Amino acid sequence: MRHDFFQRIYKLKVTIIALVTTVAGVALLMLDKWSRSSGPEWLATLPIGELGSTLFITGAFVMVWDYVDGRDSEKRQDARLRRLLSESAPAFRDAVVRGFGVEIEDLKRVATPELLDSIATNSLALRLGDRDFASEVYTDVRDQAIRAPTRWHDMDMSIRVSEAAVSATNPTPYFIVTVRREYTTIPASPVHRFACVSDRAEYLDLLSETPVTSAWYMTPRPGFDAGDKDAFELLEYSIDGVPTSIRRTTQKAGQTYTAKVPEDVVVAGKPVRVSYLYRTITPQSGHLLYFDIEQPTRNISLDLDYSDSRIHSVRVLDLIASGRRTRITRSPEDLPGRTIRVAFDGWMFPRTGLAFVWTLESETGTSEKK
């Protein structure tokens, strides 16, 4: 439609110019005839007739030529344009692809989320050679990474496992586990909750509230009450080294601690260092400590100290799905204390983590410690 409009304007201009030229030529011819019959002598000396003839012939020729050659001219222009597009299309295509591949802002200006998903899936399908596999892999990564409310960086964890004395209120042998976790993130909520529950259905519901809520499930057994502070307690919570207020509430199936995040920190939208310390208990017969990754996390360093326990040895289960290798370092046997350091460089996604499985001294029949 736009092309036809401009083409019509062009033809109208040509017609007007040709018509004006023709009329001017006729007028000059009439003036020349009048000057020769009854006009002044000086006017007759001017080449008015030659000029009029030239303008008349030119105008008439333009109108005739435009009428005769109009359609052929359009066809020649269309053919020329198609030839130029056909010859330049590969260069245009390569330039666009290279631009999108290098300049993210160029792609951002024209791409919708749906188009980006399609481009990413197609690119991955070319690399993997399997479109269905590529689609499922990308969808999983998108749901875990792109739609994650926050991302954590440079997580440091220190875990201390200590022996707890058996009492009348808790006859089951258990360990006290004290954990400090620090990481850098941009807070997305004005609160951070810590819930310990003994109802599995409620625990599964709480998992959907990550990262606002960090949830722990405690299996009901004698001496293990999810609503008791001796079973779980949030001791400290700070942002950039500044402690924040903590409020504790109890319910039928457990308890919840709510740490307030300052409003100015949330509004600023800048990275801060979050640190919190909590204490919980676990039965010695469970033989397992598991720490999951709640949000996409880049780089982790974890130290486990079990010097104050009757644990004989500890195995580390690396449940991080990555092509990169997790580094595990144990303290030398000739030094006091028993520690394990685990480090991983790279991104980790939710539903992965690290597990520690122990063997008690009483289960080996020896006092040797590893």
Image: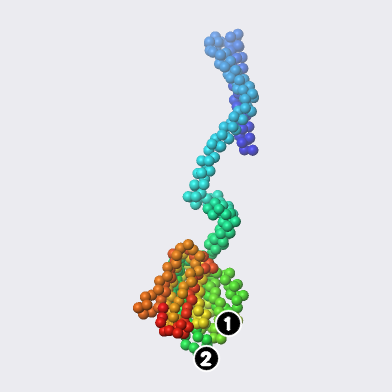
Q: CA distance from mark 1 to mark 2?
A: 17 Å
Q: Identify the residue shown where x is 52% and y is 45%.
A: 96
Residue that label 2 marks: 168
Frontmost residue, 151 versus 158? 158
The image quarter containing residue 304 is: bottom left
Where residue 62 appears, as percent x and y from the top left, is 60, 22
- In this view of the protein, can residue 365 be seen by the observer? yes
Where residue 19 appears, as percent x and y from the top left, is 62, 23
Where residue 201 appears, as percent x and y from the top left, is 62, 75
Q: Is residue 332 above or below residue 19?
A: below
Farthest bottom residue in view: 168
* Type of amino acid under label 1: Pro
Element carrying mark 1: loop
The image quarter containing residue 184 is: bottom left
Element carrying mark 2: loop
Residue that label 1 marks: 220
Frontmost residue, 300 versus 113? 300
Q: Where is the N terminus found, in terms of image quarters?
A: top right
Q: Is residue 112 above or below residue 311?
A: above
Q: Quick check: 140 left or right of 241?
A: right
* Type of amino acid under label 2: Ala
